[in-house]
Amino acid sequence: MPPPVKLAIIGGGPSAFYVASRLLSLLPLKDPMSPPLRVHMYDRLWAPHGLVRYGVAPDHPEVKNCTNKFDATATDPRFRFFGNVNVGSMPLHSIPHALHLPLTSLLNNYSHLLFATGCTMPTQHLAIPPSAWCIPALSLVHWYTQHPSQPPPPALDKISHLTLIGQGNVSLDIARILLTSPSVLRQYDVPEHVLEVLSRSTVKHVSIVGRRGPLEVAFTTKELREMINLPEASMVPIEPALLTPPSSVTLTRQQRRTLELLQKGSKNLPGSTPKSWSLHFYRSPASLTPSSSASALDMANLTLAHTRLDPATSRAVPTGETSTLPTSLVVTSLGFYADPETTFFDPALRHLRSSAGRMTSSEGSALKNIYASGWAANGAKGVLASTMIDAYAVASTILSDVVPSSQAVTTAAPPLPEMGMAPDELLNSRPDLDALPSEIVHGIKDGMVTQYDDWKIIDAEEIRRGEALGKERERMGWDEALSIIALSRVRP
């Protein structure tokens, strides 16, 4: 029988759960040929599921169905979840209540280690740094999903025009939330305090700016169709010349469908609705300055550099022209990168240093029994389906190390690139399977570390409260969750 395997996973999002579920299913509990196995998951957030809980738009509940699979994974007695735990070299200032756990504590207690930490930092635009008139999209997403970092609510009652920089799905999610009536959003997983702010919103127009053209947009046709069908908003028509592709270009199915939708325009006629939105192509921010007009104290002037596509590189290059867009607030939605304080972060890649699922040293050697998956390994790209495929491949890589001759591998592990294995073993090759780091033992005792059973109590209570309000669920924050968990622990 192979030696025991004790895997620590840092991160509690989809990639982490897909790897865990795959390993647990390929090494069945009652199979005498399976090695003794433990999978312990650590997440800096007190609730599991990462972006599924704190990133998916509330009016897309169907995307969250994957949590049923994650719940099933958590029923395996070999699996444990430890939330509100920040693994790293420094305490987490954005979530001060998170328990600090040095990475060395995991290295000393586990035989295998997986980084599934995602990309948690928003990419900023150098020309328009954060200010009173410019915030990252992540701040808004974390506000309406009640993220433990608790960003302040936007002053929507003082805003008439909002500009989004970036033409991806996150931009369209935010635009859709702002242009949809709170009475429609109320049925979904939107906290009451968020609905209250939205009900006072004075936003009348949302501009969505991109440095390239309609053929290069990152949003999906599904998201675009939802915008076009908004019941209380209309789209400003786009200049027809911008929607006419060069004759030399062969369109993909998605590009063709995107152009068709944009040419057709919104369901509501322009000017017939109280709110509106517009797409601005071939524009890139150059500066953002407060308005000098006494009558527009709540406005700023966004200077946009006009761009064109370089036919050789397909990159946006400035034409030398500029224009000004008066706006109340600019929201940058330009992607994400991994936390630079994470061990093995590569500044050039903007994510962790890995190859074919294996973490690598700065010299390019694979680190024995240390892995990476999802956005942490590949950067912030892909959807849940691609995340699952990647996670299954990483699980197969782990399995090939654990049981080299295993016949259970059904997803081929990527071949090890032409690189050696680092000579030093950073992990404990003979850990106590059921022992936990002392910090976690004390954290559980003090009630600061959540486990999956705790989460299911909160989950049930959020759903119960939501049903009473006629909605999907009513979320709670850390302090309230902590009191409910504490109460459940003292009940007989």
Image (tube, grey):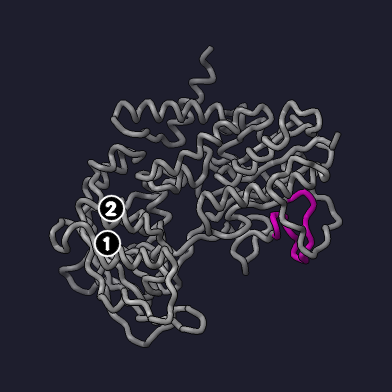
- Residue that mark 2 sits on: 178
- Residue that mark 1 sits on: 206
User: Could you say which is closer to the camera, residue 319 or residue 246?
Assistant: 246
Is 357 within the magenta?
yes
Is there any visible trace of residue 218 in the rendered image? yes
Q: Position of residue 61 (x, y in %)?
A: 39, 41
> Furthest-left residue in view?
272
Residue 156 is tagged as none
Is 17 within the magenta?
no
User: Could you say which is closer to the camera, residue 257 or residue 163?
Assistant: 257
Q: Position of residue 357 (x, y in %)?
A: 69, 54
Q: Residues within 10 Å of mark 1 (few under 14, many from 20)?
A: many
Q: Which residues are magenta?
A: 355-370
Answer whether labels 1 and 2 touch (C-beta < 8 Å). yes
Question: Which element type, helix, strand or loop, lies under badge 2?
Answer: helix
Q: Residues within 10 Å of mark 2 (few under 14, many from 20)?
A: many
Number of marks in the image? Answer: 2
User: Could you say which is closer to the camera, residue 435 or residue 429?
Assistant: 429
Task: Look at the picture and state if 135 lies above or below 107.
Answer: below
How far apart, in angstroms, are the residues tagged by discs 1 and 2? Answer: 8 Å
Question: Residue flagged by tag 2: what amino acid is it?
Answer: Leu
Question: Residue flagged by tag 1: what amino acid is it?
Answer: Val
Image quadrant for the N terminus? top right
Is there any visible trace of residue 204 in the rendered image? no
User: Could you say which is closer to the camera, residue 117 or residue 392?
Assistant: 392
Place residue 191 in its image quadrant: top left
Residue at 46% from the left image edge and 27% from the top image edge: 483
**With 460 as the anchor, is 73 left or right in this view?**
right
**With 43 as the anchor, is 439 left or right in this view?**
right
Residue at 35% from the left image edge and 76% from the top image edge: 283
